[in-house]
Amino acid sequence: MHLRHSFLALALAALAFTATGCATSDAPDPAPNLLGEYLKSTSVKNDRFPSTGGSSEDRVANFAAYYSADQLQSRLLLAFPCSNDGQDRRSGGFFDTSCTPSMAAEKTADDLGGTLNARVLVVRHKDKSLELLTLYLAGNQAIDDTGQTYADLKEFRSKNGLLTSSDLILAPAGA
């Protein structure tokens, strides 16, 4: 029990800086800790670290068994190659790397001539629900499921049709 609470405290402290640094410019002050919310949530749409039921404490304990706070943050926010088997066990835990891009996203990636990779964004919607949204990467462009391309996260944030202005996103700095 002590290990779980220590991991949670360490994770929330380590991740608070990232969430604050990556929040949108119109985020409330102080910026919410989306990664901390993600860590404790048992109902995240499109979760790549799926919960098998249980409580927030069970989820935190599961993360603590496989990852340090820094490892979890890195694994969740790093770009990754889409795999066929959907498993990435490089850090000892399980991270679903399966990718099922839409036909429009695949066509755009083919047109750009790049290898298809993916990056996860943590999204908190206006109704406080959490979602992991996958952006695809090819040819130095980000691609959403509609096939629209973006030069960077700032352009995605301002021009995408997938999120509303009240949705908050968390992505690595410089993404």
Image: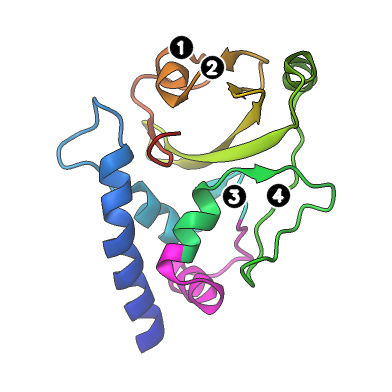
SS for tag 4?
loop
Q: Are marks 1 and 2 in contact (CB under 8 Å)?
A: yes
Read off the residue under disc 2. Answer: 150
Per the rendered image, the range of residues in magenta is 49-70
Q: Which mark is residue 172?
A: none
28 to 9, vertically: above or below: above
| Residue at far bottom of view | 2
SS for tag 1?
helix
108 to 54, vertically: above or below: above
Q: Residues within 10 Å of mark 3 (few under 14, many from 20)?
A: some
- Sooner in the amino-acid sequence: mark 3 or mark 4: 3
- Sooner in the amino-acid sequence: mark 3 or mark 2: 3
The stretch drawn in magenta includes residue 132: no
Read off the residue under disc 1. Answer: 159
x and y, in percent, of residue 37 in the image: 37, 53
Total numbered circles: 4
**Residues at marks 2 and 4, CA–CA distance in whole angstroms:** 22 Å
SS for tag 3?
loop
Read off the residue under disc 3. Answer: 47
User: Where's the C terminus, which quadrant?
Assistant: top left
Which residue is pictured at 39% across the width and 52% down the height?
35
Badge nearest the viewer, 3 or 4: 4
Read off the residue under disc 4. Answer: 97
- Sooner in the amino-acid sequence: mark 1 or mark 4: 4
Which residue is pictured at 74% across the width and 25% down the height?
114
x and y, in percent, of residue 78 in the image: 54, 47
